[in-house]
Structure formats: structure tokens, C-alpha cells
Amino acid sequence: MKQFYNILFIICAVSVNSQITDFPYVDSFPLNAEGTAIDSPNFSSFTESGDTGGFLPYGISGADTDYCFYTTYPSAGTSTTAYGYLGPFTVTEGVNDGFLVNHSTYGGGPQNFNFIVIDEAAGSLGLAKDPSGSNYDYFTSTATYPTYESSVIDLTNYVGQSIQVGIYVGNAPITVADYLFTDDWTIGSYATLSNIEFSSIENSISIFPNPSSDYINFSGLSDFEISEVTIFNQLGQISKKIDFKLNKSSSVNVSDLSAGLYFVEIKNSDNQKTTLNFMKK
């Protein structure tokens, strides 16, 4: 494993970025030709000190020359601020309405972070909002380097606006001291980016027994960070909603539902959704 004491790297301090016009846009924090600094002209960051953020060769490929943007908490419960962001760009639906970050930790975390958006017109920085206009909750990284996982958000709430997007550490609760590594930040179509992580769910989760008269069970649910399961009738009306953050059960009582076809919407912690169906006898 690489050592930390000799690999602290230059902090990116660019304050004025050029407009991003080609998508998908991926920033992997490459080194410049001289190998002396990170060459990311559309990336900016703020950290309280070199101890709370910067760049380290813990990138997603695992190569010694592959750098990532990192933040860290020296101890549980400490207060610090670090954030990085990409842009600006004008959000166009279906073109650049999604933002994906790959993330990992040094010791398994959990390390929590928020997505942020900078409104260019207002000059304000705030938590990213989902399509309904509500703030996204914080996201959690539990992968241990060299394994990376990814999180993606939907930016359709900002269509037509010029924004910058990024991550922020300092708002979400931290329970352990650890490093958060992030790499290959990607701006592109939300539909495409969300499928990178979530497309395998339809083939991995199944409902049984189907048809059912009393309970339906889910297989494969524990392999994904499921946040909510909603059951709709054929009219699109909600029949049941289960908060999986509070109830991790893989069974749902459907004995009180009328006979007929129902649709089960499964949503993960990144607000990505897929739909299955079952027949109630």
C-alpha cells in the first residue's frame, strides 16, 4: 500500500474556469507534461489546509501516476471544510443533466459527502437539488481502495442555467477518521450515467412468489443500497411505500391489496429507479 507521508500533492487553486462545451466531460485529474502539478483547467477546490484535502496518487486505475482529489477528517466528529467543483457549463436536458463521481476510502469509512451546485448567475453555492427542488441528502462511501464505487445525481432542476458542480465535505456527519478519494468526475447525460451503476438491478433482483396472496419477497436486494420501495396499482396510485433506510426487511405484506397487477418501483440511495411487477391473487 502506498504511504501517505511522502505523497501530499499540490492543492488546486484555480478560481476562474473556462466554459465546458463538449460532453460527456471527464476529469481524471491528470498530471501536466512536467509531472509537477494537476492539469485540470475546469476544476477548482477549497480546503482549509493540506491536511484536509488535495491530490494523492490513489486514482481509480491504481497506477502510481493516477491521482485523485481527496478530503480527510483527522478524527471523528471534527469540523473541517473541503470542496471541489467542475464547470461552468449550461445544463441541457439529455446532454449534460447528470453528474457522476467515483469514490473510495482508505480504511472503509464510512465517509459522507454532499453534492453541491454553484449558480453562476447568483454567485451562490448550495447543496444540489433533485428534480423536485429538494436538497439531495448526503451520500456515503464505504468502498476500500483500490475498489471504487460511484454516485450520480440528476441535474434537470438546473436546465438552462449556467452552473458548476462538485462535492462538499463538512456538512454531513462524520463518525470515523478516514480519507475520501474521488476520481473520474463525469458530466453527461443522466440517463447514461445512471445506467452505468444501476442497469444490473433488473437482472439481479426478483420477486417471489409471483403471483402471491399474502407476502412478496425480494431476492438480490441486499446487493444494492436500496432506499425505498413503492408499490403502485394499474392506475398509478400508490398502494404501499416502504422506507428501506428504516426497514431492511426483504418481505412485504400484500395481503390487504386487491387482486390484480401491481408495479414495484425500487429506488436506490442515488435516487435511481427501476420497476418490477407482480400479480396479487
Image: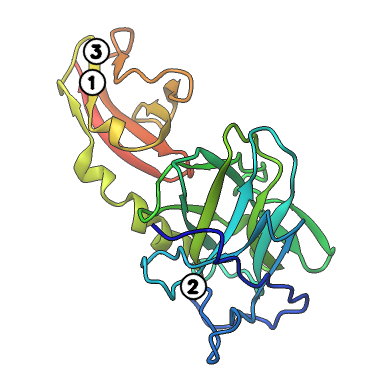
Measured as percent of width and height from the top left, residue 22 is found at 53, 83
- Please, what is the three-letter code of the amino acid marked with disc 2? Ser
Measured as percent of width and height from the top left, residue 148 is found at 39, 54
Who comes first in sequence, dot 2 or dot 1?
2
Tag 1–tag 3 contact (CB < 8 Å): yes
- Residue reaching furthest to the right: 122
Give the residue pinned by disc 3.
215
Q: Does residue 219 lie above or below 158 as drawn?
A: above
Q: Residue at x 50, y 78 (%)?
A: 23
- Does residue 189 show up? yes
Helix, strand or loop for disc 2 = loop
Who comes first in sequence, dot 2 or dot 3?
2
| C-alpha span from label 1 to label 3 | 7 Å
Helix, strand or loop for disc 1 = strand
Number of residues whose C-alpha sits closer than 10 Å to that of mark 1, classed few (under 14), some (14–19) or many (20 or more): some
User: Of 193 and 34, which appears nearest the observer?
Assistant: 34
- Please, what is the three-letter code of the amino acid marked with disc 1? Asn
Q: On residue 217, which mark appears?
A: 1
Helix, strand or loop for disc 3 = strand
- Does residue 100 show up? no
Which coloring applies here? Answer: rainbow
Q: On residue 279, which mark appears?
A: none
- Please, what is the three-letter code of the amino acid marked with disc 3? Tyr
Give the residue pinned by disc 2.
28
Number of residues whose C-alpha sits closer than 10 Å to that of mark 3, classed few (under 14), some (14–19) or many (20 or more): some
